Amino acid sequence: MKVLLIGSGGREHALAWKLAQSPELTTLYAAPGNPGIAEHATLVPVNTEDNDAVVSFCKDNAIDFVVVGPEAPLVAGVADRLRAEGFAVFGPSAAAAQLEGSKGFTKDICARYDIPTGAYQRFNNGPKAKAYIREQGAPIVVKADGLAAGKGVTVAMTVDEALAAVDDCFEGAFGAAGAEVVVEAYLDGEEASFFCLSDGKHALALATAQDHKRVGEGDTGPNTGGMGAYSPAPVMTPEMVERTMKEIIEPTMRGMAESGYPFSGVFFAGLMITKKGPELIEYNVRFGDPECQVLMMRLKSDLLPILYATATGTLDKVTAEWSDDPALTVVMASKGYPGSYDKNTPIKSIPEAGEGAKVFHAGTALKDGALVATGGRVLNVTATGKAVGEAQARAYALLDKVEWDNGFCRRDIGWQAIKREKA
């Protein structure tokens, strides 16, 4: 099978690494890819923001299957365009991708199909949003409605912080994404990520993970795209997984189909496990980053036929087998992230990873033959172990061999699970 993978981050490196292991794969192309992905795929300079250019490449190269990694091309309709030309695509239509592209759309689906989530209101002007916040009090959550690269959400512990977040949105801090805001109730509990494939009619539960969104140790400081993750999430017991499927995933799948937006791809449910059970914080319509990296480390099955079954409506014919060993990834980011940071800083050396370990490239490039850091989140140092504590120790031992002066990381990834292990 000839496959095109769209994307250039750590998530796509993990997908490329796993897809490359498939006996069903003949050729793997990646657009635009990164130097890590180049170890597993042929990089092609296709403008992935130009749907016509993507279609032309697929026709010229007789591509059998397209795997879309990031959310932006999905929201921009690349899957629709490819499907209209007869290509099999992993990833939802633009209409279904609104589950991630619009926080308000998701909240409305939850309200219509009785999916447990925090109470909310949508606003397209600042004064009304602020009046609602003053009426509700804090803690409260303010979200830019559109795509904001994981940075458009403020969990405000004071009313003043919430009011400032509203100003940020309407004053353009998140561009067009902040033209509308969703203000919702603060949910108290433990966060978890749940991944489930859907072909529109069938669902296949994958695995759970926990992400560390805050930049600082002890989960302090501003939100980021994610500073590390581990899988599985201990809070997601078999009972909690079953409830999530019945109360959240299955009603969403039915509701999307009934609303005229049948969903094909991956449901990435951001959950809060509260005293009442699982409640939905938000949906993403692609694999998480960096959660995908730990999922791929634990997946024992061949990824390619599972994704292809999702794309072709035959998800009931496949299963996914997982290693019981936890996996943990630590994000190495550029100093200053999530604020401003220097670009093109040299990465002198990345260590060879042994069995059950891998350094995934996220924001890297080759400049005059030398590896440089081009993004905020740059490397994902990943390892497995018999317990989360062992996976953590192995990941940090590998990370300490990376030679990159401008990099920093959190040193406490996995702390909640390790605390449980020691209890």
Image (cartoon, grey):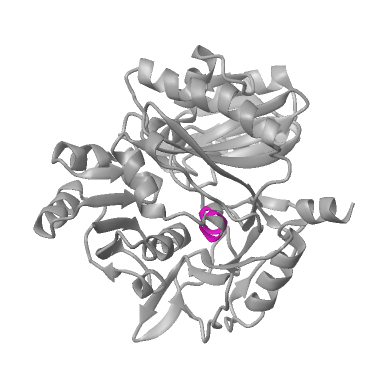
Instruction: Tell me where residue 297 sits by quadrant.
Output: bottom right
Instruction: Report if residue 235 is visible in the image.
Output: yes
At a point 9% along the width and 58% down the height, the residue shown is 60
Which residues lie in the magenta part?
Answer: 292-297
Instruction: Tell me where residue 162 sits by quadrant.
Output: top right
Q: Which residue is most to the front?
A: 317
The reply, left or right, for residue 204 in relation to residue 158 is left
Q: 131 or 19: which is nearer to us? A: 19
Q: 364 or 265: which is nearer to us? A: 265
Please state the horizontal and vertical placement of residue 366, each as a whole percent of the image.
37, 79
Main SS type for the magenta part? helix
At a point 34% along the width and 25% down the height, the residue shown is 262
Q: Which residue is most to the right?
A: 423
The reply, left or right, for residue 14 in relation to residue 329 is left
Instruction: Tell me where residue 85 sits by quadrant.
Output: top left
Please state the horizontal and vertical placement of residue 336, each as a whole percent of the image.
60, 65
On whether residue 257 falls in the magenta region, the answer is: no
Please state the horizontal and vertical placement of residue 411, each as a whole percent of the image.
73, 66
Number of numbered markers: 0
Q: 10 or 233: which is nearer to us? A: 233
Image quadrant occupied by the N terminus: bottom left
The reply, left or right, for residue 369 in relation to residue 294 is left
At a point 51% along the width and 34% down the height, the residue shown is 283
Instruction: Report if residue 123 is visible in the image.
Output: no
Q: 69 or 390: which is nearer to us? A: 390
In the displayed structure, 207 sits above or below 44; it is above
On whether residue 293 falls in the magenta region, the answer is: yes
Please state the horizontal and vertical placement of residue 421, each as a whole percent of the image.
83, 54
At a point 57% along the width and 74% down the height, the residue shown is 355
